[in-house]
Amino acid sequence: MGEIADRSSAPSNRAGEAGDTSGAAERIGRESPRTTADAEERRLAWMYLSRVLEGPCPALSELISRVGVREAARAVRECALPESLRGPTERRRGVDRVERDLEVMARIGGRVITPDDDEWPQWRMLGLAQLDPARDPEAAVPLVLWARGPLSLRQYTEQALAVVGARCSTGYGEQAAAELAGDMAAAGWTIISGAAFGIDGTAHRAALTVGGNTIAVLACGIDRPYPAQHERLLAEIAETGVVVSEYPPGAAAYKHRFLARNRLIAALSDGVLVVEAGARSGARNTAKWARRLGRPALAVPGPITAAASAGCHRMIREGEAILVTRIEEVCDEVGPLRLPLPTGRVEPRLDGDQETVFAALPVAGARQPTQLAEDCGLDVAAVRAALVALEVAGLVGVDSSGWFRTVRTGG
């Protein structure tokens, strides 16, 4: 199987406001179709592979990065594959429903977003691409995103907060979620959640109520409202926001898909806010992905007697999440970088590598230079130079666990 050399950008398949672009930097690593026919062939290859795998597959992502999506699709069809891919592709390699999937998407007013498209949230997905699949087997970048709604997925995830929590929520939790999500949406933040019962649904509704933007990330095909009782809510989100999934039309919602879906909720956001979570909770799993991606995980405390808040309290106690109770505290953690200094000192203005590296450092915990280099897309030497400058400025420190912030964001 030979490698394909074409690596650049591609025409976009988009709807509504999805035509916004952000320059050549966002197209790094893409293959460049030379003709419209090439672009369509690649689009169909992405869709075919999405149907065959139906979910994250690091081995396939690695193959695509080496040989290109068209050659990877051919290899899957002919079973000319390494051993690691033969099992995962065996069941559905003969299933090619591309034309049917296109008909379904046209019928529901949806679209297919591939890594070739301008609407693809390239920088958001970069974090997933840098994770070690040996440690996080489901960390692979999705092959395709199936979307329905007028908002550009790339543009409206540039300032986004994930709000997640218990399905069996309490009145207290729903009030807290509604106030925080509503205030953030009113301030121009996109609210991202999973459209589940409880806190998820409350967060979506709060954003819609204030006329804000919201994105629902599903663990099934976007043509199958899940849960069924939220069909109307999902229809409302699709009218003004985006309903999105990595699973093709008709795909059912299985348990393992919810856990895989959680990584996308975290990846598309600047941070994850958990409002109520039991001791064993999918919301805690989403917060875990936020930490893996170097993004803040936040938690709202509840009554100490409330089982619905036990997971939040544990995350706060064990340093997995930062306690927040109001919008100002949320913005301090996930908002634009602000570096307050003691009175009498002039606040430095960071730019270039220093700003990039400081932003990549988590608000809780530490990182090694090699981890930061992967997160930032810089070489290790540049990261080390930026860290030294930040240390001289009194903004970061280092110990046996790695480099950490000595100054919290906010001001």
Image: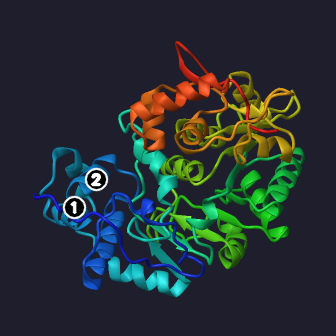
At 78% from the left edge and 46% from the top edge, which residue is drawn?
A: 331
Residue 86 in percent (x, y) is at 20, 51
Report the side of 225 relative to 406 (left or right).
left
Give the amino acid type for the residue marked by disc 1 in the picture.
Ala
Asked if residue 82 is positioned above or below residue 382 in the image, the reply reads: below
Question: Which quarter of the rendered picture does the N terminus lie within?
Answer: bottom left
Residue 20 in percent (x, y) is at 55, 74
> Foreground: 222 or 210?
210
Quarter where residue 209 is shown: bottom right
What is the CA distance from the residue labelled 1 to the residue labelled 2? 8 Å
> Foreground: 135 or 304?
135
Residue 18 in percent (x, y) is at 55, 76
Asked if residue 233 is positioned above or below residue 363 in the image, the reply reads: below
Give yes or no for contact between labels 1 and 2 (Cβ–Cβ under 8 Å).
yes
Report the side of 288 relative to 371 (left or right).
right
The residue carrying pointer 2 sits among few (fewer than 14), some (14 to 19) or many (20 or more) residues within 10 Å by Cα, namely: many
Residue 288 in percent (x, y) is at 58, 36
Question: Residue at label 2?
Answer: 60
Q: Secondary structure at mark 2?
A: helix
At 35% from the left edge and 50% from the top edge, which residue is drawn?
A: 57
Report the side of 142 relative to 171 (left or right).
left
Of labels 1 and 2, earlier in sequence is 2
Quarter where residue 158 is shown: bottom right
Tell me which colouring the rendered structure shows.
rainbow
Question: Residue at label 1?
Answer: 72
Tag on residue 93?
Answer: none
Q: Secondary structure at mark 1?
A: helix
Question: Which quarter of the rendered picture does the C terminus lie within?
Answer: top right
> Foreground: 232 or 296?
296
Asked if residue 157 is positioned above or below residue 356 in the image, the reply reads: below
Give the amino acid type for the residue marked by disc 2 in the picture.
Leu
